[in-house]
Amino acid sequence: MALQTTRIDVTDRIIGKLNGRSLELYEEGELIGRLPLPAAVPLKKGYTEQNGRIYKQVIATVEPDQKYVDCDGEAGWC
């Protein structure tokens, strides 16, 4: 049996994880490379980047145990 080296397209299996100022590329859990990021990364509205971290602007309750629900005060149903 003869064997030869060939290429297969694995692009759809690549996952990127942000790590500081670079994007680490993984294929099936194995780190295969790093891409440096530019100083400013354009993001969708509502998202920001700061010190290598990505933040999403959301609406949240002020108190830790509060629930965001609209309850019927008379019958006690939520």
Image: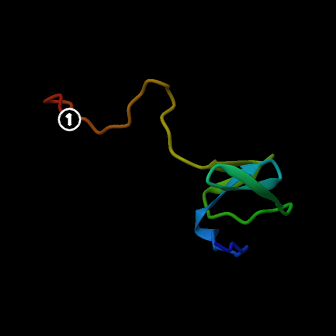
Describe residue 32's horizontal placement relative to residue 15 as left or right.
right
From the viewer's perspective, is 44 left or right of 5?
Answer: left
Query: Which image quarter: residue 4?
Result: bottom right
Q: Is residue 29 above or below residue 8?
A: above
Q: Position of residue 49 (x, y in %)?
A: 73, 53
The residue depicted at 83 percent of the width and 52 percent of the height is: 21
Q: Is residue 31 above or below residue 13?
A: above
Task: Say if 32 sits above or below 11 in the image.
Answer: above
Amino acid identity at mark 1 = Asp
Task: Give me the residue at 81% from left, 55% from top.
Answer: 22
Report the number of discs.
1
Residue that appears at 81% across and 46% down: 51
At x 65%, y 48%, the residue is 55
> Mark 1 — residue?
72
Q: In the depicted view, which residue is nearer to us: 59 or 4?
A: 4
Instruction: Please rate how many residues cluster around mark 1, counting C-alpha atoms within 10 Å: few if below 14, some from 14 to 19, many from 20.
Output: few
Quarter in which the N terminus is drawn: bottom right
